[in-house]
Image: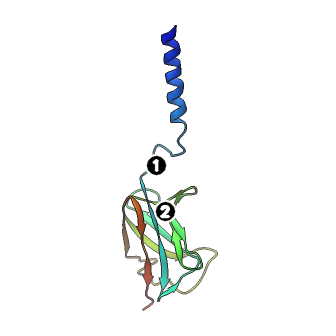
Amino acid sequence: MKRMILITVFVAIFYMSAGCSDRAPDMPELGSVHGTVTLDGKPLSGVSLYFEPEKGRTSMAKANAEGIYEAVYLLDENGVKLGPCNARVEWGIDESGPAIPPQYGTKSKLKLDVKPGDNTFDIDMKSK
């Protein structure tokens, strides 16, 4: 009888501890990605940034009034999937401003290799 109670307690503790994590079992490792986006040296407010890994979910960010952004993987999870990714800058549906040069937007050549921990990725776009 003692053995059965001990097994039941062990199983209960196992399931309770497994259920304590808010992180999905298929969640990839993420690195924090943040920085400043500027156009011709001036902060670009309200612009959207997209970080697209070779495989997996795209992370997004939106620059504040000072051009500062932080990438978000999920609503409550900041970061970008580790490894190489392409980055692009675009105006969102409700935002507009100066034209984004194609090499940073629709035909972006921006690349980033996301490492564990903190990654600063400043984007200084030139219009000419």
The three-letter code of the residue at mark 2 reads Ser
| Left or right: where 83 falls relative to 13 | left
Name the residue rendered at 49%, 29% in the picture. 14
The disc placed on residue 36 is: none
Name the residue rendered at 50%, 12% in the picture. 4
Name the residue rendered at 46%, 84% in the picture. 101
Q: Position of residue 16 (x, y in %)?
A: 55, 31
Q: Position of residue 109 (x, y in %)?
A: 37, 76
Q: Which residue is mark 2?
A: 59
Crowding at mark 2 (Cα within 10 Å: few <14, some 14-19, many 20+): many
Question: Compared with residue 31, is residue 128 higher up or lower down, i.e. above or below?
Answer: below
| Left or right: where 87 falls relative to 47 | left
Dividing the picture into quadrants, the one containing residue 108 is bottom left
Q: Nearer the viewer, residue 54 or 117?
A: 117
N-terminal-most mark, 1 or 2: 1
Q: Which residue is mark 1?
A: 27
Question: Compared with residue 30, is residue 48 higher up or lower down, i.e. above or below?
Answer: below
Point out the image quarter for the C terminus.
bottom left
Name the residue rendered at 52%, 71% in the picture. 69
The three-letter code of the residue at mark 1 reads Met
Q: Position of residue 79 (x, y in %)?
A: 47, 60
Question: Compared with residue 72, is residue 107 higher up or lower down, i.e. above or below?
Answer: below
Dividing the picture into quadrants, the one containing residue 67 is bottom right
